Every structure is written in C-alpha cells, then in structure tokens.
Image: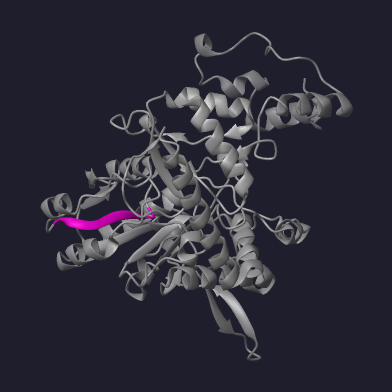
Amino acid sequence: MFPYIPHTADDEKYMLDCIGANSIKDLFKDIPDDVRYKEDLNIEGPLSEIELSNHLKQLSCKNKNINELICFLGAGAYDHYIPSAVKHIVSRPEFYTAYTPYQPEISQGTLQAIFEYQTMICNLTDMDVANASMYDGQTACAEAAFMALEGTRRKKILISKTVSPNTRKVVQTYMKYHGAFYQEIDMNDGETDIEKLKKEIDKDTAAVILQYPNFFGIIEDVASAEKIIHSNGSMLIMSVNPISLGILKTPGELGSDIAVGEGQSLGNRMNFGGPYLGFLSCTNKLMRKMPGRVVGQTSDVDGKRGFVLTLQAREQHIRRQKATSNICSNQALNALTATVYMSVMGKKGIKEVAEQCAKKAHYAYKKLIETGKYKPLFDKPFFMEFAVKSHSDINKINDELLRNNILGGFALEKEYKELKNSLLLCVTEKRTKDEIDNLVKLMEVIA
C-alpha cells in the first residue's frame, strides 16, 4: 500500500495472523466508523529529490528571516551574534545523539559536557547548583514553582505581572493541575508594585516570581522585594536574562533561592521560536528538590576523574506519582551550544556583549524620544529593551518598518490591553549606529 514501507504483503499477513487480525483496518476498529476519514488525502503525488528540494525552497522563501531583516524585536527571543566556532563544534556528528547518559562507562563525553554546562550556569547566576537543562525558560520557571511548593509545604504562588506573559501562562497551567493557588501581583510604572506585594503575601505563600530585567526591559528593585519575601518565610524565584548578568547583580547576590531563565541568548539561534533551553539553578538547601538530571564529578577505581548522574531519585522514572517532577529529558544539544558559546565568549566577552546591548539600547531610546513623536512609556532604568508610546497605530508602524526590511518591536497591547499604542523595542550588540539611526528616522516619518 505504501511503497516507502519495506514490509512485503507476506510480511504484513504474517504479522496480522500473529495478532489474530484479518486486515490492517482491523487495527483501527476501536475508532468509530463515522469519524474515520475515508477519502484520499488532498496532497500531490510523489516528487523526485530535486523537485522536493525546489518545492521546500519555494515554501521557505515565503518567510522573512533575520538574515534579510534588521531585527529590533525581543520579548523573549533575541538576535545576538553567534561566533562561527559555536556552529562548527556543535555540528560534529558525535554530539547528535538523544541517548540518555545512564551508563557512565560509555557516556563520559556527554556527561562531562553537561557538567561543564552546569558549572557555567552556576558561575553566571552565582548559585550553588544547576541541573542539566530544561525544555525552555517557561517550564523551568514552572518547575521552580513546584520546588518551592515542595520545599515550603505551602500552596500559593505569587507572580508579578511584569513577568513574561508566556511564562505566566505556563506557570498558571502547571499550578492549576497541581492543586496550587496562583495569583498575579499588579505592576506600578512598569515594575512590580511593592505595596501590592506586601498586601498579597501571606503565610500560605510558597514563593514569589520576579523577572530581572522584566518583560519591559526594566531592572526591577529585587532587593526591596527580597526582604519582604524572606521575612515571610517564602522563596524568591528569579527569571533572569543570562546576558544581562554580565553587568547586573546576580541572583545569588540578590538573595534568590532559585534562578531560572531562557538560554536561547547563549549561542542558540532564534529558530522560529524553538527549540530552546531553560536553565535552573538553586541553593544547596534545595538541591534534592531539583527536577531533571544533575551530573556530578567523581573518581573511578583507578583514581581518574569521571562523571555520573547523581542525586536523582528512581521515582523520576518508575514511581512517577511520587516524583518531585516528571521531567526526564533535557535539551542536551542546545545546552551544549550554550556551553560552547560561554566558553568562547568567556567572562569578558559576555560582559562586553551586555555593555554593548545596554549602551546601544539607551542610544536608540534617547534618539527616539528626541524626535518628539514618541514618549517614554515608563521612567525606569532598563537593560536592552524599552517601551515607547505613540499616537499612531503600532501595527501600522511595524508594517511600514517591515516594508523597509526592519523587524519592528512588540505591540504591548497584545498582552497588556491597557498599554495601547505602545511598542517594546530591543537593541542587541548586533545593531550598528547606522541601523539604529535609520530606525529612528523611519519611525519619525511614520509617526
């Protein structure tokens, strides 16, 4: 029936006889006949390799990408420069495996790569221990909330409305089906409302989640919030931009119990939204509550340095109803990419990237405000993203920018109904002065 399947008619008959079925259709008898699709699928016939390649190329040309466009869009995915060495190293065939490194005697390379990744994440966040990587920043944040619930034996999670909308939606879903109480804290002038936090936090609050810098790019006053949170016996979970930590205070310095974030900025391409990787690090006190894998360093019988999976309860795999988390996978190739990127850049390199992002973003902000056509939406210190307000329709501004090969900012009204005609722009180290000046010139004319 399907020429690309190698089984012959005799093979199929033999397998059907073994299970007592008369035909392949019998395998689907549990599906009601009235919901089965009985027509042929509306797709073209087979293509040769050349024809298929050309067809896929034509389809891909319908998309615009950051090789064609100048990107000023952030809001969770960032157009950073990736050194060419990163691609060449992670493209080696020995890294392209999804095999779980349960058997250390044949997995030393994979285990060491994960160990180095964990070490670098700890150094970056200034936390005690990190795990092997999560699916993405959103699920990492939800898993951190689980850790807090388990660690405090409380049932309430508070999250600021300045946290990324995508992250809030994922955390809310996780909490709903975990039987936990989810509540959002209002914002004031683009950052977490400290007075509202004081009012809402109580003895049932397991943790408070803050983003740093927050969704609007603003550098939150985490120090003030930390005192309120810890005096209540709750945990502080910080969702952080890893590049910003090159110049900002780390979660460890700010007293965070758990630090999470999206690792796409660390050498991973934007990839149309994925795959990405989430990182999670915490204090030693919470080490045994950490989900997923942790790779530890040890010595073999000959005293040689070696690596093994450690601190991982079997409940993660066989008694799942008793597990702290049911995450049993990690974004190993994406984490390796982040590891290579951090190795190539080093401390000075990441600091320089962060400094360039901040300086160029502030230059773009200043020039836009000087046009008189845009006003600051918030008056707070920011890192590399900032929000401006216009009298013009934001979608029309972005459409006109796109016609000039510029990928504009994020229309905040999509997620914050009260922030009409407001645009969130991002400026990374890749943007040149000429590109920024051209953006400002076009936006002035459009407005």
Residue 439, quarter of the rendered image: top right
Residue 118 picture location, percent across and down = 52, 69
Residue 303 picture location, percent across and down = 63, 91
> Residue at (55%, 79%) from the top-left corner?
297
Left or right of residue 356, residue 325 in this image: left
Q: Is residue 377 above or below residue 219?
A: above
> Residue at (53%, 73%) from the top-left corner?
119
Residue 294 picture location, percent across and down = 49, 68
Residue 337, quarter of the rendered image: bottom right
Q: Main secondary structure of the magenta part?
A: strand
Residue 3 seen in this snapshot: no
Q: Nearer the viewer, residue 35 or 262?
A: 262
> Residue at (31%, 29%) from the top-left corner?
417
Magenta region includes residue 207? yes
Residue 199 seen in this snapshot: yes
Q: Nearer the viewer, residue 123 or 1?
A: 123
Residue 216 picture location, percent across and down = 38, 45
Q: Nearer the viewer, residue 334 or 398?
A: 398
Stretch of the chain drawn in magenta: 204-213
